Image (cartoon, helix red, strand yellow):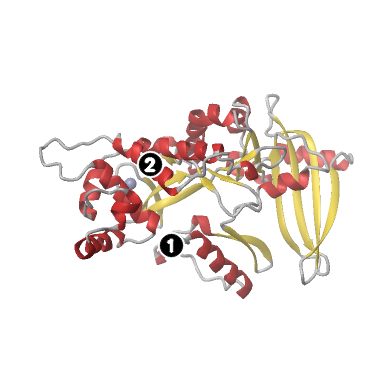
């Protein structure tokens, strides 16, 4: 029997990490412990309630007990400014251990067995996400972009997550912060952060059969080579504009009849769709004699009655492709439970709720229209799941 992963075990993992946080205070007046400050901050995010701590203080006054103490073990509840003062100097690296401890706990408890796909692989999606943006507030670690002669400041991180098609939950792995000195081009910054993350965690992941998923910016030779060197696998989006040599070769092979093709017919409830898969093994990822050889596949979805193209995407992978495994390889890339498929103005896309953030109105380019009622319902259902206690 494996031990169940209980809330108390998760909290105790955090507690141990918080106890080791460096304390920058020098004076005698140490009313609040670093541990209490960190756990207090965590409790606010966990409860999804900004006023959680204030409620607990009121409860303590009334009833001589409070949930901050009983659930999270917080001894003395610090105020928001006190929490900020204590935690601002702490670097995020001090909090990396709990991500991996929780992960091994889930692994030991066999909670992650159902996440195995493609002959026993775990799928880890790499994606950059912005968590701060302003044209006014900034710090020395901000990435600065200039648009219409205005400087915008932002912070971005890569947030790798363990995903699987049909699994409702994703498991967050340790994030890696994108640093402005990583490069001038946005793509370089994100890729370099991913390389750092990989260097740090590849040895651990290699023991577990891991396949990385990611968009076109990861589909680049140095990055793919690093993945393979670490005995890991990849399935990355592969666009023609950034892979001209590969697509030239695919076109050539297609003329020779060497690109395999097969179709499937899918009933959607209000019509048939034709799903056409094409694939070929052993094509160069880039130009030049030292090009990494990869395997390429694409899926095009067309409305059978109207002939309208609803979806198209292509991928490069190190997995040897066969008619048998191509659909699963393609499906691996569409498996975020926090993304709701939708059709908008004749194009198939996704409502990407994991990338949701508050943005200033001035950043919105324009109003394009409304998604249909069914998708709206589904978005609400995913929200309910995301924010459920
Ligand atoms: Zn900043």
Disc 2 residue: CB within 8 Å of ligand 1: no
Q: Residue at x 30, y 42 (%)?
A: 140
202 sits left or right of 238 in the view: left
Considering every residue shown, the one lying at the far bottom of the view is 373
Is residue 197 among the parts visible in the rendering?
Answer: yes
Task: Tell me whether the residue at label 2 lies in contact with that at label 1, contact meaning CB atoms closer than 8 angstroms.
Answer: no
* Quadrant in the picture for the C terminus: bottom left
| 78 or 237, nearer to the observer | 78
| Residue identifier under label 1 | 363
Considering every residue shown, the one lying at the far front of the view is 1
185 sits left or right of 119 in the view: left
Q: In 3D space, how far apart are the residues under numbered discs 2 and 1 (Cα atoms)? A: 41 Å
Is residue 134 among the parts visible in the rendering?
Answer: no
Q: Residue at x 87, y 39 (%)?
A: 258
| 312 or 322, nearer to the observer | 322
Question: Where does residue 302 sit, x and y in percent of width and height?
Answer: 78, 61
293 sits left or right of 151 in the view: right
Question: Where does residue 355 sit, x and y in percent of width and height?
Answer: 50, 55
Note whether 365 is above or below 199 in the view shown.
Answer: below
- SS at circle 1: helix
Question: Where does residue 263 sit, x and y in percent of width and height?
Answer: 85, 53
Sort mark 1 into few (<14), some (14-19) or many (20+) by Cα contacts within 10 Å.
few
Q: Residue at x 81, y 53 (%)?
A: 276
Q: Which mark is residue 305?
A: none
Sort mark 2 into few (<14), some (14-19) or many (20+) by Cα contacts within 10 Å.
some
| Residue identifier under label 2 | 12
| 244 or 338, nearer to the observer | 338
Quarter of the image holding residue 307?
bottom right
Q: Residue at x 32, y 61 (%)?
A: 50
- SS at circle 2: helix
């Amino acid at each position: 029997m494996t031990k169940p992963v209980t809330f108390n075990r998760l909290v105790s993992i955090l507690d141990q990490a918080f106890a080791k946080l460096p304390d920058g205070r020098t004076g005698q007046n140490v009313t609040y412990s670093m541990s209490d400050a960190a756990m207090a901050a965590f409790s606010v995010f966990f409860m999804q309630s900004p006023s959680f701590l204030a409620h607990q203080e009121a409860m303590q006054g009334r009833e001589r007990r409070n949930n901050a103490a009983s659930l999270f073990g917080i001894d003395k509840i610090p105020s928001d400014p006190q929490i900020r003062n204590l935690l601002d100097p702490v670097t995020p690296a001090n909090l990396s251990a709990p991500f991996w401890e929780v992960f091994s706990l889930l692994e030991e408890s066999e909670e992650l067995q159902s996440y195995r796909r493609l002959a026993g692989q775990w799928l880890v999606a790499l994606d950059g996400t912005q968590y701060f943006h302003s044209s006014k507030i900034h710090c020395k670690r901000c990435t600065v972009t200039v648009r219409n002669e205005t400087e915008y400041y932002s912070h971005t991180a890569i947030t790798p997550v363990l995903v699987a098609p049909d699994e409702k939950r994703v498991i967050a792995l340790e994030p890696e912060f994108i640093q402005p000195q990583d490069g001038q081009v946005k793509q370089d910054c994100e890729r370099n952060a991913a390389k750092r993350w990989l260097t740090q965690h590849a040895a651990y992941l290699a023991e577990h059969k891991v396949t990385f998923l990611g968009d076109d910016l990861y589909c680049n030779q140095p990055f793919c080579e690093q993945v393979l060197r670490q005995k890991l696998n990849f399935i990355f989006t592969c666009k023609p504009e950034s892979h001209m040599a590969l697509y030239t070769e695919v076109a050539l092979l297609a003329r020779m009849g060497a690109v395999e093709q097969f179709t499937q017919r899918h009933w959607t409830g209000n019509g048939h769709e034709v799903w056409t898969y094409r694939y070929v093994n052993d094509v160069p990822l880039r130009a030049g004699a030292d090009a990494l050889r990869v395997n390429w596949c694409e899926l095009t979805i067309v409305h059978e009655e109207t002939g309208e193209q609803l979806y198209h995407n292509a991928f490069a992978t190190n997995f040897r492709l066969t008619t048998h495994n191509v659909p699963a390889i393609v499906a691996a890339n569409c498996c975020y439970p926090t993304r709701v498929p939708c059709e908008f103005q004749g194009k198939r896309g996704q409502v990407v709720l994991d990338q949701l953030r508050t943005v200033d109105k001035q950043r919105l380019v324009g109003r394009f229209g409304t998604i249909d009622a069914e998708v709206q319902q589904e978005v609400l259902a995913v929200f309910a799941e995301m924010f459920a206690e």
